[in-house]
Image (cartoon, coloured by chain):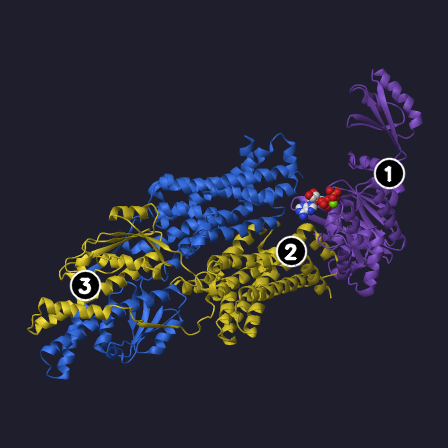
Amino acid sequence: MKLLAITLKDMTRSFRSVFALAFMFGVPLLVTGMFYLMFGGSVGSEGAAFTLPRTRVVVADLDEGSPYFQMDGDNAEDLQDMGDILTHMLSGPQLAELIEVTFASDALSARAAVDRQEAGIALVIPANFTRAMIEPQAVAEVELYHDPTLTLSPGIVRTLVERAIDSAAGPKLGLGVIVKQMEAAGLSPDAAQQQSLAMRLIGDTSGAPAELVTLRASEGEAPTADPLAAMLGLIMGGMTVFYAFYTGATSAQTIMTEQEHGTLQRLFTTPVTIPTVLGGKYLATGLTVLVQMIVLLVCGRLIFNIRWGALPEVALTILGTALVATSMGIFLISLLKTDKQVGMVFGVGLTITGMVGIFSAFTGGAPGASSVADRFALFVPQGWSMAALRAGMDGNGLVAVLPFFLGMLAWSVVFFFIGVRRFSKRFA
Amino acid sequence: MKIIDLALKDLSQILRDWKAAVFLLVSPIIFTLFFGFVFSGGGGESDPRLPVGLVDRDQTSLSAALLDLLDDSTVIRVEAGDDLAALERKLAKEDLAALVVIPAGYGAAMQDGAPLTLDVTADPASNAGMSVQNELQGTAQRLSNASRAAQLSVEVLEEQQPFASSAAREQAFAQALEDAIATWQKPPVTLSMRSSALPAAEGEAQLTNSYAHSSPGMMAQFAIAGLIGAAEVIVRERKTRALQRLLTTSISRASILAGHYLSMFIMIFAQFALLIAFGQVFLGLNYAHDWLATLMMALSMAAAAAGMGLLIGVMAKTEEQVIMFTLIPMFILSGLGGAWVPLEVMPETVQKVAHVSPVAWMMDGFQNILVRGLDWRAALLPAGALMAFALGFTLLSILRFRTVSE
Amino acid sequence: MTTNTSIEVRDLKKYFGPVKAVDGIDFKVQQGEIFSLLGPNGAGKTTTISMISCLLQPDSGEVLVMGHSTRSAAQQVKAAIGVVPQEIALYEDLSARENLTFWGKMYGMRGGMLKQRVDEVLELIGLTEHAARRSGKFSGGMKRRLNIGIALLHHPQVIIMDEPTVGIDPQSRRSILDGVRALNREGATVLYTTHYMEEAEELSNHIAIMDHGHLIALGTHAELIRLVGQQTRIDLTLNAENPAVLPAWQQVDGVSQVYAEDGHLSVLVNDSNAVLPHLFEAATTVDARITGIDIKEPNLEAVFLHLTGRALRDG
Ligand SMILES: Nc1ncnc2c1ncn2[C@@H]1O[C@H](COP(=O)(O)OP(=O)(O)OP(=O)(O)O)[C@@H](O)[C@H]1O
Ligand SMILES: [Mg+2]
């Protein structure tokens, strides 16, 4: 059959082109590999996902202590006051993976270190820090001065410091409450009594704080055994979808290059019809995308240990993507008048729609970003393909994948008819 | 001057396709808005706090106190309800960042000194989930402290004089708890956050900040994307043997390269100028705060990108290769350089490696200007690094071009 | 039409905007003959061929190939013809054999028949040894030969060749022309465009001369030559420019036309032997010295010149 001969010829040519192969298989694997090195490779051990970089914190501990506050004389680290305890905690081994503490002699030089970008955060512990924790009327303000380009680490350090302040201030606050209640009941506790109450409160709050929250994964987001694989799955999936559409377009582009090289015109001097030529191209493109996706997904499974979900769901996603990527390729090419516009429209046109479509692969973490990105993504066909892939990965069953498959089918039909109409007109 | 004639010829070839030119301006704008929107949390809601659904199965003074404390949170916004299923649906639609259930017996257990845990449902991998978890842990800790104080206060009172009834005892506890919660709302030591950021209106701060990242990021990425058209001109010149023809005229190889370089530089700089103006006027970004610094960055990045375009043009043999040689570095350099996701959230090794990408330097420079509010001196290092890239790319191009004989 | 007409072109027109590429031409190509379309660049040869091979729709007029109209029976026409395009059109990333096989399938051939025919054509175009090489790596002449071979695969009844010999070395050109003649002997009708007049002279039964979209002459070689009479052209070179010499020669008995062209002067005469001495005499009377003489027997060039007043520029 002539149609199949055209298909076979096109596929032979594209698999013979080093360029096409590099684009189809090399780049997606390369990019995923890059992310693997960026996020996972540096960690190494049992796929412990992202480790945030350590934040440099410069501490100016100006705390002067309080006469009412005495540490046990025999503490090894020679801690004198609450400020010392706080800095001791911050520079302790538990937090060593998160922050790196250095010291400054005063607030000014601490802030200057941040301004010089030698540290991300300056923490200024005021002179009356201990007193505010101990003496009834004293209040103090700890200053956290940070580099404005940082968005995550200041929040983390803030949480750490606030926890510490909370537990340090707990006894004072508690004592205040008790004394107030006693006074309301007509009692007036003496200093010794207060001291003993304070000690009871301190005794209660010291020691590791209990876990007061249990976190469960939301429906459908089954906790993944391998979070690195899960993240890479999104990225590799995104890359697969992105480049599937590229392949669709570059394969369809052979219509343009055949026209440029005169072989298309020559084809039309032989007894083949325009639908046969377009059909052969379409089939070749579709099969190429199919092969590409299968190879990439299998590679993802073997190299990065990504779980794509059950076979029927994945098969449906691949089929839908091949259809829509091919149709979109034909459609895009039908818009072009000369071979010269190809690069621009492809490069930029496909890149834009592709980035929108697979954006969710990169926003897994950003608060609120995922839902916004997901909604935007459905404005482009790549988004539907990505959504189908994710539905399969989440293990939500065929029913969850089907709407996205139908969406892709709808896109395909529209693209196909516009594209084929335009071509038929052009060559008739 | 021949170089200028050549550059003008290039520019008219590149811009003949006006749609491509529009693309190069419109798409970075779209993406700047998109990324900015996405990273600011999106939704355009006035309240930046994370919405959290809450079901109180306990209904005691302690659970009420927890709600009180949470009202003051700067991180989460509680949406209390009774219908767990409805809230779960909202969570599934991602209208809520998390769902919290205060279990029955929560208050009693806390009074017994063996607190139950709050049941939080969220995406554990997301930042939102982490933030909610942290905030609840801290708040529950405060509640536990308050409860402990109230408990102790009741015990002390009881030691002095037993309560008339258990109701009276309850009453005393509730009173003490209320006091304790009130004092927790005014802790003796507070923490204030400050930064050296350019002053911006409070409400706008977060949104502006995210554009301050996405605007230069997308500018860099699409400067590279624009190289496709320009590099294709060079490739086509060679393919159609117009280059050989040029070489038969008195123009030197160096002048030919210089002409191409100039056209790309002008194109990218014009692209930057328009995008910077857009950022300044419509996104409230303060590029104008030090024009000299902004100019230094734009010029040096245009120089580096043009050098890259030149290299692509002399390396690629076909138009297809141009696309490959442009788009792959575009993805890798902008991804690695922090144009999409801030370098801040990447591991330290990556942050160090990142600066092999000129995009990272461009981001550094513009962050210094837009976010840190620094002046031209802070642009010196990044601009210098970009000029080094420009020089390196250009030298490589010259070396390569010398051997392009056919 | 008669049964032994392969191609019939009736009042064919094709305009590209203001350019009248083909402006009302008529001709018939008889079955089994070699028919040449001769004309300078831009005469409209390729446009005519494109309409005959169903690539372009005529603005008006009609083309019948083997009795089938290109408008209503394009598929039958296409099945009957083998087209060699002016620009090389093949898949450079496929080998010669793969190219031939693919195009053979496009002509509806398959199986062992196709394979055998591919081998035959490879032999014919002299590429048997290079059959497995990618055609992109071929020399220009080898590509041209493959370009021609593709059109011969399915034993077309009509072979349409648009300047097939451009850029081919004399030896290969010779073998291609021999090949064309051989195909013709086997019964194929050949429509051939060229601006090499020797090729047209040597090969063709009938020659049509095109210029500016019009057929300005059509006939056998002999018939066309007769248009200019038995005239011989004498090209003369002078030692120095002398405007007076032209009118002087015009007066000489037996001279039918005199003109200047490209630095030399041409004189059309019936009998060169009789006229030549008188040309020398006339030159002497106006003080001109003849430094070079070139006598050309009548050819198509002269025909074209005669009809258009311009030279047919060729290689
Ligand atoms: N697609 C087209 N669009 C516009 N003008 C065209 C087109 N094709 C041919 N022409 C014009 O029609 C005229 C005849 O062109 P054609 O290609 O038929 O000439 P030709 O005789 O084959 O010349 P050559 O010997 O150079 O191949 C020329 O003036 C050409 O510019
Ligand atoms: Mg022609």
Q: Amino acid at mark 1?
A: Leu
Label 2: state its secondary structure: helix
Residue contact between numbered discs 2 and 3, judged by CB atoms under 8 Å:
no
Nearer the viewer's eye, disc 3 or disc 1? Answer: 3
Task: Give the residue pinned by disc 1.
Answer: C227
Q: Residue at x 79, y 64 (%)?
A: C110
Q: Residue at x 50, y 57 (%)?
A: A37
- Residue A315 location, x and y as percent? 57, 71
The residue lying furthest to the bottom in this view is: B165
Q: Amino acid at mark 2?
A: Thr
Label 1: state its secondary structure: helix
| In the depicted structure, whether residue A80 falls above or below residue B98 | above
- Residue A250 location, x and y as percent? 61, 56
Task: Give the residue pinned by disc 3.
Answer: B186
Q: Relative to residue C262, is residue A367 drawn left or right?
A: left
Q: Residues within 10 Å of mark 2 (few under 14, many from 20)?
A: some
Quarter of the image for the N terminus of chain B: give it: top right
Q: Amino acid at mark 3?
A: Lys
Question: Looking at mark 2, is its residue's CB closer than 8 Å to ligand 1?
Answer: no
Question: Which colour is chain C painted?
Answer: purple
| In the depicted structure, whether residue A280 falls above or below residue A106 | below
Query: Are labels 2 and 3 assigned to the same chain?
Result: no
Q: Which chain is yellow?
A: A
- Res C4 visible: yes
Subunit bearing disc 1: C
Question: Which colour is chain B painted?
Answer: blue
Task: Give the residue pinned by disc 2.
Answer: A254
Question: Looking at mark 1, is its residue's CB closer than 8 Å to ligand 1?
Answer: no
Q: Residues within 10 Å of mark 1 (few under 14, many from 20)?
A: some
Q: Relative to residue A337, is residue B97 drawn left or right?
A: left
